[in-house]
Image: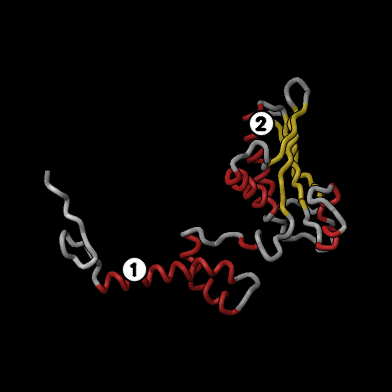
């Protein structure tokens, strides 16, 4: 039975492994270095800095195409409040069903939950550009894009649930400050939540 040649580091005793030429190695190293710097552009941009602003202008097409422009502020240093969508559906028999988007019990594994969480965060991140600074959050007007997104979600729920109408609310969940944590305030304390109605949607023709 013939033995298979084995490559060795010094090339003796078997077939030699293919190697890249110097030019190819330099190009690969340059591409790798460019990519690694692109990964750092997001974290370097928070808080804003002159170097990060310059790099973002240079790297913007690449990081958007490669989806490297992640929401690093969600993790640190100050993630700010998170947002959920609460829906209430009125069924044909008059009963009501309620749920959250995302739902920790339904949307599992965690990555699946995160993907739905990005949907609710995207809705919250499209405020009306003409809102007054002194307006309470609960009374802020919904922007045109928020209304379009809410209508799209409502249509999906109407179709999926077979409901007669769906009401959507935007829920904002604030984080407790360090003093509140030391005082024993839980992360899910009701005082940390507030809501704003996005609209009530019915089946077409109603």
Q: Residues within 10 Å of mark 1 (few under 14, many from 20)?
A: few
* Secondary structure under the numbered disc 1 in the rendered image: helix
> Which mark is first along the chain, 1 or 2?
1
The answer to whether residue 51 is left or right of residue 196 is: left
Q: Is any part of residue 145 visible from this angle? A: no
* Residue at numbered disc 1: 28
Q: What's the distance in space between the residues labelled 2 and 1, CA to CA?
A: 51 Å
Residue 166 is situated, as x and y percent measured from the top left of the image, at 72, 34
Disc 2 and disc 1 in contact, CB within 8 angstroms: no
Q: Position of residue 179 (x, y in %)?
A: 85, 62
Residue at the spot 60% in from the left edge and 71% down from the top edge: 45
Q: Is residue 31 left or right of residue 138?
A: left
Residue 197 vertical position relative to residue 49 in the rendered view, above or below: above
Judging from the image, what secondary structure is the residue with disc 2 in? helix
Residue 119 vertical placement versus 6 (above, below): above
Q: Few, some or many C-alpha atoms within 10 Å of disc 2 (few <14, some 14-19, many ≥20)?
A: many
Front-most of 91 and 144? 91
Q: Quadrant of residue 169?
A: top right
- Position of the C terminus by quadrant: top right
Residue under the image location 67 percent in, 37 percent down: 105
User: In the rendering, at what x and y percent does residue 185 appear?
Assistant: 85, 53
Question: What residue is rendered at 72% in x and 36% in y?
Answer: 99
Percent x, y for residue 191?
A: 86, 50
Q: Is residue 194 above or below residue 38?
A: above
Would residue 72 be visible to someone looking at this image?
yes
Residue furthest top in the image: 93
The outermost residue toward the right is 183
The disc at residue 158 is 2
């Amino acid at each position: 039975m013939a033995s298979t040649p084995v490559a060795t580091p010094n090339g003796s005793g078997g077939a030699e492994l293919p190697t890249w030429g110097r030019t190819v190695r330099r190009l690969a190293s340059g591409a790798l270095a460019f990519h690694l710097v692109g990964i750092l552009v997001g974290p370097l941009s928070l808080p804003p800095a002159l170097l990060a602003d310059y790099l973002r202008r240079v790297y913007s097409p690449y990081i958007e195409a490669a989806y490297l422009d992640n929401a690093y502020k969600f993790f640190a240093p100050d993630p700010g409040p998170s947002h959920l969508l609460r829906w209430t559906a009125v069924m044909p028999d008059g009963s009501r069903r309620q749920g959250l988007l995302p739902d920790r019990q339904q949307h599992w594994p965690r990555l699946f939950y995160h993907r739905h969480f990005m949907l609710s965060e995207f809705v919250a991140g499209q405020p009306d550009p003409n809102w007054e600074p002194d307006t309470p959050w609960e009374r802020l007007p919904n922007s045109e894009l928020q209304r379009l997104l809410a209508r799209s979600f409502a249509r999906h729920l109407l179709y999926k649930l077979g409901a007669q109408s769906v009401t959507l609310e935007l829920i904002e969940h604030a984080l407790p400050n360090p003093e509140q944590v030391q005082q024993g305030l839980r992360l899910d304390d009701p005082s940390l939540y507030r809501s704003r109605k996005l609209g009530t949607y019915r089946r077409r023709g109603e």
